[in-house]
Amino acid sequence: MDYLNSLFSLDGQVAVVIGGTGNLCGSMGIALARAGAEVILVGRNPESAIEKLAAIDAFGGKSWFHKADVTRRDDIDDLLTAALLRSEKVDILVNGAGVGSGTPFLEISDSEIAQLMDINFNSVFHACQIFGDYFIKRNEPCSIINMGSMAGRMPVSGIFAYSAAKAAVHNLSKNLAREWAEHDIRVNTLVPGFFPAAEASRLGDEMRALEILRHTPMSRFGNADELSAATLMLASNKAGSFITGTEIIIDGGFSAMTI
Ligand SMILES: NC(=O)c1ccc[n+]([C@@H]2O[C@H](COP(=O)([O-])OP(=O)(O)OC[C@H]3O[C@@H](n4cnc5c(N)ncnc54)[C@H](O)[C@@H]3O)[C@@H](O)[C@H]2O)c1
């Protein structure tokens, strides 16, 4: 156990998990807390944090909720200020706020594109700017985990603006990894395949779900806790010490499938 602890323990670390009130990042927040980090769950709705905060409390972990709409730059500034006030530092940032939309390409309005870009990409851009500036000044090893998507790597039908925004997240992560390696700030993208628990509407109808399963060698969807191990590896400055600018795909083999 000493060996595992030396690699994965996050004791004494502070993690800000944007989207931590949701399904996947909520589970990732719990995993970070289980590894010893103090976790700040960030979202728009305090009620959706209650269950996650209680789960962390149940094993003696430390966490708190911060309300923010991360499409607003000011809210991200306030988030950093609040985190430094209450937890004194931040070591890990997870950027996981996201929403999809199945509007057909020719029908997507400018306002819908702008809203999807705001939530799925601009929020990540601003959080990386604000926290990255802090991380550089702090001058300690830090980790940023951006939530990408299979849809950001390859065409997935029907979710055009979301896919484009996620492709931008993948690209930004690599650029920042290159820029900030000299500061020991690692920036990686976690790429889930299909984890429909909170995404029934994104997956659409039953036929589409069947198509996805047919294209997934493991013939099933992912469960949120199947992101935990990769999250801890990317977050840990020991286990992930030489991992930056990469994408960790967790998709039951979806991206390995052609015909
Ligand atoms: N579930 C999947 O199959 C899947 C696949 C690939 C990528 N992803 C990505 O993983 C991340 C988490 O997805 P999820 O399935 O857990 O979704 P989810 O809807 O359960 O969680 C998303 C969270 O983001 C928060 N959020 C949305 N807009 C926000 C805003 N403006 N300000 C603050 N918080 C905001 C929501 O409140 C919610 O808590 C997203 O970035 C998503 O795009 C999910």
Image: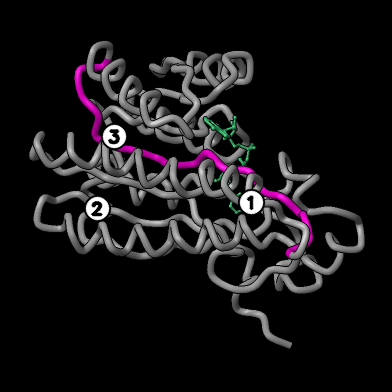
Magenta-colored stretch includes residue 225: no
Q: Earlier in the sequence, mark 1 or mark 3?
A: 3
Q: Which residue is mark 2?
A: 186
Residue 71 coordinates in the image, percent (x, y): 48, 34
Q: Name above or below for residue 120 compared with residue 86.
A: below
Q: Residues within 10 Å of mark 3 (few under 14, many from 20)?
A: many
Mark 1 and mark 2 lie on one chain; the one further toward the N terminus is: 1
* Residue 94, quarter of the rendered image: top left
Q: Secondary structure at mark 1?
A: helix
21 w.r.t. 94: above or below: above
User: Which residue is depicted at the point 61% across and 51% down?
Assistant: 113
Taking 83 as reference, is 25 above or below it? below
Q: Position of residue 190 (x, y in %)?
A: 46, 55
Q: Which residue is tagged 3?
A: 10
Residue that lies at the very extreme toward the front in this rendered image: 110
Q: Amino acid at mark 3?
A: Leu
Please name the residue that numbered disc 1 is placed on: 110
| Residues in magenta, as a range | 87-105
The residues tagged by marks 1 and 2 sit, at their Cα atoms, a distance apart of 34 Å
* Residue shown at 45% from the left, 33% from the top: 18
On-image quarter of the C terminus: bottom right
| Quadrant housing the N terminus | top left
| Left or right: where 119 falls relative to 83 | right
- Ligand 1 shows up in the quarter that is top right
Front label number (1 vs 3): 1
Q: In the image, is residue 89 part of the stretch drawn in magenta?
A: yes
Depth order, front residue of 90/155? 155
Q: Is residue 11 left or right of residue 20?
A: left
Per the model, the C-alpha gap separating discs 3 and 2 is 15 Å
Q: Tag 2: Cα neighbours inside 10 Å, few (<14), some, or many (≥20)?
A: many
Residue mark closest to the camera, 3 vs 2 = 2
Identify which residue, 235 or 118, lies in the foreground. Answer: 118
